[in-house]
């Protein structure tokens, strides 16, 4: 598992065989039209996506960057429960 502030490092995580990357940084796009910029700069802005054998989860977070306003990107606090495969 890799904890990486920015989702953009997913490409390095895939190359190194990481199973799961947890990231933030994007605030889920936080505020229109900034969401379009966030989508251009990041492979995933919010939620869970798979890149090859690596999963990337990006949290919107509970705070804000700049103005304390969110439009179309509600705050979230994520609980991740890890479990091993049964042999």
Image (cartoon, grey):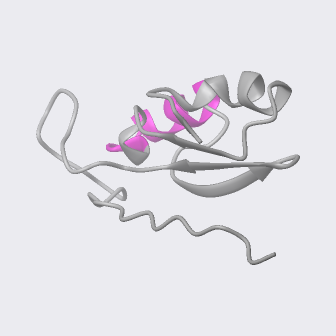
Q: Is residue 66 visible?
A: yes
Tell which residue pokes out farthest to the right in this image: 52
Give the side of residue 51 with respect to residue 18, left or right. right
Q: Position of residue 11 (x, y in %)?
A: 76, 26
Tell which residue pokes out farthest to the front in this image: 87
41 up-or-down from 53: above or below: above
Specify whether residue 5 is painted magenta: no
- The quadrant in which the N terminus is found is top right
6 up-or-down from 68: above or below: above
Give the side of residue 39 with respect to residue 68, left or right. right
Region of the chain picked out in magenta, as a range: 29-41
- The quadrant in which the C terminus is found is bottom right
Tell which residue pokes out farthest to the left in this image: 68
Q: Quadrant of residue 63?
A: top left
Q: Who is closer to the viewer here, 39 or 61?
A: 61
Give the side of residue 64 with respect to residue 4, left or right. left
Residue at (29%, 54%) from the top-left corner?
A: 71
11 up-or-down from 46: above or below: above
Q: Is residue 32 visible?
A: no
Q: Quadrant of residue 75?
A: bottom left
Q: Position of residue 50 (x, y in %)?
A: 76, 53
Q: Who is closer to the viewer here, 10 or 2?
A: 2
Residue at (50%, 26%) from the top-left corner?
A: 6
Residue at (36%, 41%) from the top-left corner?
A: 27
Q: Who is closer to the viewer here, 29 or 60?
A: 60
Q: Position of residue 44 (x, y in %)?
A: 62, 43
Q: Position of residue 31 (x, y in %)?
A: 32, 43
Specify whether residue 35 is painted magenta: yes
């Amino acid at each position: 598992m890799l904890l990486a502030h920015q989702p953009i490092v997913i490409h390095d995580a895939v190359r190194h065989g990481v199973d799961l990357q947890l990231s933030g940084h994007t605030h889920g796009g936080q505020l229109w039209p900034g969401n379009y910029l966030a989508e251009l700069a990041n492979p995933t802005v919010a939620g869970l996506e798979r890149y090859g054998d690596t999963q990337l989860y990006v949290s919107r977070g509970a705070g804000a960057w700049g103005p304390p306003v969110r439009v179309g990107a509600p705050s979230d606090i994520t609980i991740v429960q890890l479990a091993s495969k049964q042999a």
